[in-house]
Image (tube, rainbow, N blue to C red):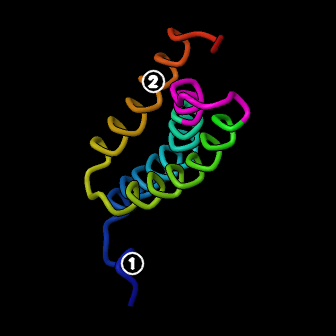
Amino acid sequence: MRITVLLRPQARSVTAFAMIGRCLTALVGGYAAAAGLASLTARLLPIARAEATGWGMIISFLIFAILGLWAFHQPHLTRVAAVIWGLAALSIGASYLLGVRA
């Protein structure tokens, strides 16, 4: 017997909305955080621009996978959303404030 059958209809809708929020945070927020950290990494590495961009892109795949797995491992959705969206906002903001590498 499935667990969702035992829940009240109202409880099923709450868990469905929580799962949708978790999926959107993991996919969209994880992508934004990985992209922001990749550009920040490329900006801060003291090597040639092309190599720094390559390393930033390589690291972004690892970051996206880690954030996606952690988003479903962490039991508190508010903590997941705060960390992932906060990381995305901070990394993109820092990249924007640092500007283009000379």
In the rendered image, residue 51, in percent from the top left (x then y), is placed at: 68, 38
Q: Amino acid at mark 1?
A: Val
Which secondary structure lies at badge 1? helix
**Residue 89 circle label:** 2
In the rendered image, residue 20, in percent from the top left (x then y), is placed at: 49, 51
* On screen, residue 53 above or below 102: below
| 5 in magenta | no
* On screen, residue 7 above or below 41: below
Q: Quadrant of residue 49?
A: top right
Q: Nearer the viewer, residue 27 or 93?
A: 93
Image quadrant in which the N terminus is located = bottom left
Q: How many marks?
A: 2
Q: Residue at x 58, y 42 (%)?
A: 31
For the view shown, which residue lies furthest in the front direction?
47
Image quadrant in which the C terminus is located = top right
| 44 in magenta | yes
Which secondary structure lies at badge 2? helix
Q: Residues within 10 Å of mark 1 (few under 14, many from 20)?
A: few
Q: Nearer the viewer, residue 95 or 1?
A: 95
For the view shown, which residue lies furthest in the right direction?
50
In the rendered image, residue 94, in percent from the top left (x then y), is placed at: 46, 17
Q: Amino acid at mark 2?
A: Ala
* On screen, residue 30 above or below 44: below
Q: Nearer the viewer, residue 39 or 23?
A: 39
Q: Which residue is mark 1?
A: 5
Range of magenta residues = 38-50
